[in-house]
């Protein structure tokens, strides 16, 4: 799950001082990188400018921690030849996640004229820092994304309720994107189980146990050189015990897992766009291009295209699941173009069926 920490200080030396040498040679450039803006990412004064706020607020911004699932992080230790592709896949997915947050969760509340309105906003500057280990030296690929509380050209800070409301959807989108990007950039394939566990095809579960990430003490922050980390991981592998490989499901990677999608909405009477994004992303067992994912939601649920913030419009559970159309045409394709072809004929048949049903009922009532 994405974690969000509130920042009340512009002191970013914790991040700028960490050179993250464990990823030297695996990432492009230094650990810091600009998603929007420019400047010296090693200069705490320059980076601290991202954390902007209003005169009335003590919150200067937020630190969004985006972490790869454990099995994917483990790949940077087991497969040095493809580790750079893993890091690139992670960064591409971080960018897609930030894009979703800005598009759907970044809202400023305007109370002028006695009427409260939600206005879409954007960040002037966003910077992120990519790290590859946790405090115990285990492989742990993650980013710290710094965003300011005051969006560009806004007079008041962002609505934090809106941001936190979209965290689950943003996390699901990140993981789906990461599974997709990993397949594009490396020989590895990641998949998500029905229970929500992330796996990598061919990766023994013994490695997850070896680098489990659970310790009684938090530990101190480490500053290790690349060769020191590699040596540590090689030493760790002496304790590796084979536990077996979890077989991946026999599901088409180009289609949505409709059972998972419907299950993700279970218990909801009214469904918002963010719930659709979360359920859809979790139902892409082998991942999906995030651009296609968002287009798919817009194609199928056009009344929610402009829906954003915490007070999103909703649709019925029946409309969200589209069970009748899925029964007619099969599981929905993940490519937006193919989905358009799937949707139009099935919608026409559904409309004709609805008209026929209404006509039959009318005839019987005469």
Image (cartoon, grey):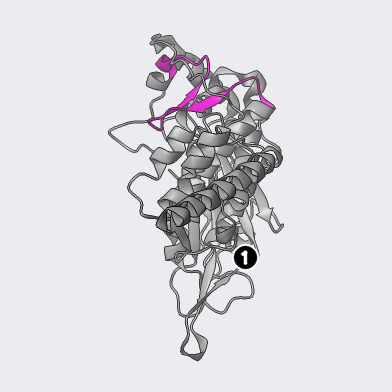
Q: Please state the horizontal and vertical placement of residue 336, each as a whole percent of the image.
A: 67, 42
Q: What SS does tag 1 mark?
A: loop
Q: Relative to residue 165, is residue 179 drawn left or right?
A: right
- As drawn, 145 above or below 310: above
Q: Residue at x 48, y 35 (%)?
A: 258
The magenta stretch spans which residues?
185-207
Residue 228 seen in the figure:
no
Q: Which residue, given by chain and number where applicable, does mark 1 sit on?
A: 122
Q: Relative to residue 15, is residue 168 drawn left or right?
A: left
Q: Is residue 206 magenta?
A: yes
Q: Relative to residue 129, is residue 244 drawn left or right?
A: left
Q: Is residue 93 magenta?
A: no
Quarter of the image with the N terminus is top left
Looking at the rendering, which quadrant does residue 189 occupy?
top right
Q: Residue at x 63, y 34 (%)?
A: 89
Q: Please state the horizontal and vertical placement of residue 94, each as a whole percent of the image.
A: 59, 44
Please identify the residue farthest to the bottom as the structure is shown: 113
**Picture mark count:** 1
Q: Residue at x 45, y 68 (%)?
A: 59
């Amino acid at each position: 799950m994405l974690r969000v920490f509130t920042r009340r200080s512009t002191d970013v030396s914790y991040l700028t001082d960490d050179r993250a040498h464990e990823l030297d040679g695996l990432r492009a450039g230094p650990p810091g990188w600009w998603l929007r803006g420019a400047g010296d990412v090693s200069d705490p004064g320059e980076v601290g400018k991202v954390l902007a706020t209003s005169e009335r607020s003590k919150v200067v911004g937020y630190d969004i921690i985006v972490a790869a699932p454990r099995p994917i992080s483990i790949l940077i230790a087991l497969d040095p030849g493809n580790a750079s592709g893993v890091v690139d896949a992670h960064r591409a997915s971080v960018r897609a996640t930030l894009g979703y947050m800005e598009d759907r969760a970044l809202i400023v509340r305007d109370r002028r004229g006695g009427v409260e309105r939600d206005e879409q906003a954007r960040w002037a500057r966003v910077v992120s820092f990519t790290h590859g280990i946790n405090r115990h030296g285990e492989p742990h690929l993650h980013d710290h994304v710094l965003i300011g509380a005051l969006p560009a050209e806004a007079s008041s800070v962002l609505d934090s309720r809106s941001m936190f409301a979209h965290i689950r959807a943003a996390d699901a989108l990140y993981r789906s994107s990461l599974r997709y990007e990993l397949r594009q950039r490396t020989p590895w394939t990641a998949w998500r189980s029905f229970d929500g566990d992330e796996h990598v095809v061919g990766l023994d579960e013994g490695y997850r146990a070896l680098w489990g990430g659970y310790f009684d003490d938090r530990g101190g922050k480490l500053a290790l050189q690349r060769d020191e980390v590699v040596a540590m991981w090689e030493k760790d592998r002496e304790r590796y015990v084979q536990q077996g490989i979890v077989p991946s499901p026999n599901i088409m990677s180009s289609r949505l897992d409709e059972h998972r999608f419907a299950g993700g909405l279970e218990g909801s009477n009214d469904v918002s766009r963010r719930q659709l994004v979360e359920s859809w992303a979790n139902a892409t067992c082998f991942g999906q291009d995030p651009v296609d994912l968002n287009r798919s939601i817009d194609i199928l649920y056009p009344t929610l295209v402009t829906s954003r913030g915490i007070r999103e419009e909703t649709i019925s559970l029946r409309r969200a699941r589209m069970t009748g159309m899925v029964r007619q045409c099969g599981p929905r394709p993940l490519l937006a173009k193919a989905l358009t072809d799937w949707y139009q004929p099935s919608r026409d048949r559904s409309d004709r069926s609805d008209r026929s049903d209404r006509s039959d009922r009318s005839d019987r009532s005469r």
